Image (cartoon, rainbow, N blue to C red):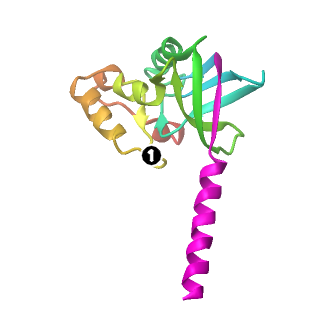
Amino acid sequence: MAYIEVRALLIFVLLMSSAAGAKTLTGRVVGVTDGDTLTMLDSGSNTVKIRLAEIDAPEKKQPFGARSKESLSDLCYDKAATADVQAKDRYGRTVARIKCDGVDANAAQISRGMAWVYDKYVKDKSLYQLQDEARAARLGLWSDPEPMQPWEWRHR
């Protein structure tokens, strides 16, 4: 019985430390690199490069790349933002779900047809419904008869 209690306590502590490790940043968006990357000036006056989690936008030279960047700029540039940090990527960027003036920018990019759900990293399966709706309405990149996913385009 004591083994089970110790094990349960250990699991509880691990879960709580994981939740406590989750970080939220607040600030203002001061730059947009492309359709899934922006720069935030946080409340401590630090610039933070943020890669939007769970989505992948067309590359700059890819069809819809410039329109995707413009869309994210419309959503976020010079607006108050909250970033729920998930991880750091291999380039040192903060990976996060971000809300700009209360709008979920990750989901908005999908529903506008300006990004794909990034199958390899998606956690929020509801993004697939938004993608299906954008595809059915032929919004953004879905107006292209054969849109190429950015992860395939990068490996060409």
Tell which of 154 and 91 is nearer to you: 91
| Vertical side of 112 occupied by 18: above or below | below
Asked if the magenta segment contains residue 19, the reply would be yes
**x%, y% of residue 64?**
43, 20
Residue at image location 59% in from the left, 16% down from the top: 80
- Classify residue 42 by image quadrant: top right
Residue 115 relative to residue 92: left or right: left
- Classify residue 6 by image quadrant: bottom right
The kind of residue on which mark 1 rests is Val
Residue extending farthest to the bottom is: 1
Residue 44 relative to residue 122: left or right: right
**x%, y% of residue 88?**
66, 44
Residue at image location 28% in from the left, 27% down from the top: 134
Tell which of 153 and 124 is nearer to you: 124
**x%, y% of residue 14?**
62, 64
Range shown magenta: 1-30
Binning the other alpha carbons within 10 Å of mark 1 as few (below 14), some (14 to 19) or many (20 upward) gives some
Residue at image location 44% in from the left, 46% down from the top: 122
Residue at image location 71% in from the left, 28% down from the top: 48
Q: Which residue is mark 1?
A: 122
| Vertical side of 72 occupied by 128: above or below | below
| Vertical side of 85 occupied by 44: above or below | above
**x%, y% of residue 82?**
58, 27
Tell which of 144 and 134 is nearer to you: 134
- Judging from the image, what secondary structure is the residue with disc 1 in? loop
Please say whether residue 152 is visible from this viewpoint. Answer: yes
Number of numbered discs:
1
Asked if the magenta segment contains residue 70, the reply would be no
Residue 35 relative to residue 30: left or right: left
